[in-house]
Amino acid sequence: MLQEIRITNFAIIENLAIEFHSGLNVLTGETGAGKSIILDALNLILGGRADTDTIRSGASTATVEACFTLDDPQTLAMIADLGIDVDNGEVIIKRIISSSEKNRTYLNNSNLTVAALSAIGDRLIDIHGQHDHQSLLHPETHVDLLDHYGRLMQNRAEFQEHYAAYQKTLQTLKQTQTHQGERLQRQDLLNFQIDEIDKAGLSVGEDDGLKSEKNKLNHAEKLHQSVQNILDTLADADGSVLELLGRVDRELQGLPEIDPALETQAQRGQTAYLEAQELAEELRDYQKTIEFNPARLEEIEDRLAEINGLKRKYGNDIATILEYRETIGQELATLSLGEESIDALKEEIKTQQKALAGLAVELAKQREQAAEKLKKAVEKELRDLNMKHVQFSVRFVYETDAEGFTTYKNKKTRTHANGIGEIELLFSPNPGEELRPLAKIASGGEISRVMLALKSILNEQDPVPVMVFDEVDSGISGSVAEKVGTKLKKIAEQKQILCITHLPQIAGMADSHYRVHKTVSGKRTRSTIIELDYEHRVEEIARMSGGETITETTLKHAREMIK
């Protein structure tokens, strides 16, 4: 669930922290008070687009931070796969929008891409605003609703896995047939390139090592002379550093017996002498390794010339050349399949088509069975929402495909990535009206109620723990509003609900009630939110019922609503 959200310098919100609770959380307030801004902040937490225009005037950054407690194994596994630790199921997401620097995204203090956050966010909160209600008007979303309700998503995933493999086989066949005419010519080229790269026996980092060795050989004489000069000064010449340090060491060794305070200096003198001895020995050993080898230098230059020639042909570095070798090796393997491969691929396609047809037909039958149950369930929910004469149905349209490999209801049917057939929800709100697509008949209030009915039905199948309803009360009032509130309350028994509403009937159902309030001080506007206690809830619901003038009658009515 969503435990808390903290917002700083976001739109008209200067500094805000809200703790939410389980059950039904209702947010109320006058139009323009900032309720939609809180929704925008939640969208940002779920991976929504970060816009610098949302930074509060006078500030350079805006911050939105939310704390969740999770227990869903799949969501926790997604986070673990990103290498992020989660202790006790607590997840803290933070977005920072900056006008001068790069925007930043964190999950439990670890950097995160917005794409990764979006994938996780889809499993944290399900937001339903007016634009989400309108998604019901798009038939392409209807198959998802039906498959969720019928618990067919796993069946569909199995079909899609087979379908993807089938499409890949078709692509392989197409590529193999396309290559047939130029196959031999391409094979000759690839064989030559592979042979050239393989003969070179490249290893990553080899060129850097050769350049270092070449540099040493080129400067062998200078190295030898410089080391000899150092050795002369350090150890070999009369009055050398080593001879002088030895004299210093001998003088120091007897002094601590006179004054113990010089013990440290005596040790350091001895250390300096020993260090100089070791340095001289190391330099003598190094001098022996210096090689005057023109033949080896020529060999290195030839090898580097060979590597540079391959770089010009196949890539900027050895790693890229070897990667190219792997790619053309795979292509050559495909080309080498030849005519036998084409026949084998055609046989494989027939086998895949037979399996796909069986899965598609079974999925279509299961969908039609689920559609009957969905029809009855939605109609019951809508009757509870005061749509007494509503009719609801799911229409299946199966497109004929003379070349298709799936036969359903005695005709060849087009097969696509979701199976067979197109699905559309049909609706009739009044007696005597024929069933028609939602997009052509439903009003805004009816769409809101259809969405709420579907969410009530799909509540158990939906793994997302938090649901947000924005303006679910659009176009309704009176007893219908009370029934909408009852539905939300029922959903909130299993999920945490955040509901933005203008209706007192819904606000009265809240387990926790928050009021969003806008104030103007000087020339600055600020939006704040507070959780209401019982008496302030009564006042707020009375305001929502009767306007700014609150009477004892409206207060009494508000208490009755809460009761």
Image (cartoon, rainbow, N blue to C red):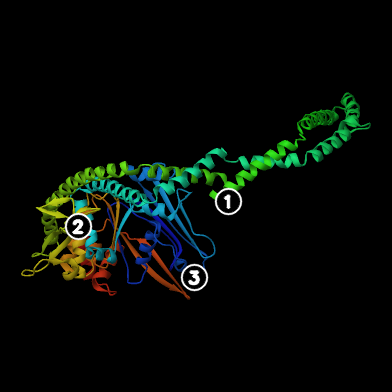
Q: Position of residue 101 (x, y in %)?
A: 54, 61
Front tag of 1 and 2: 1
Query: In the rendered image, which quarter is residue 4 located in?
Result: bottom left
Query: In the rendered image, which quarter is residue 476 located in?
Result: bottom left
Viewer-side residue, 157 vs 408: 408
| Residue at the image point whose x is 47% and y is 76% from the top | 523
Q: Position of residue 391 (x, y in %)?
A: 10, 63
Badge 1 is on which residue?
Answer: 312
Q: Which class describes the residues within 10 Å of circle 3: few (<14), some (14-19), or many (20+)?
A: some
Mark on residue 450?
none
Which type of secondary structure does the marked residue at label 2 adopt?
A: helix
| Left or right of 92 in this view: 246 | right
Badge 3 is on which residue?
Answer: 57
Front tag of 3 and 1: 1
Q: Which class describes the residues within 10 Å of circle 1: few (<14), some (14-19), or many (20+)?
A: few
Which type of secondary structure does the marked residue at label 3 adopt?
A: loop
Q: What amino acid type is highlighted by mark number 3?
A: Ser
Query: What separation in Å lies between label 3 and label 2 (alpha carbons)?
Result: 41 Å
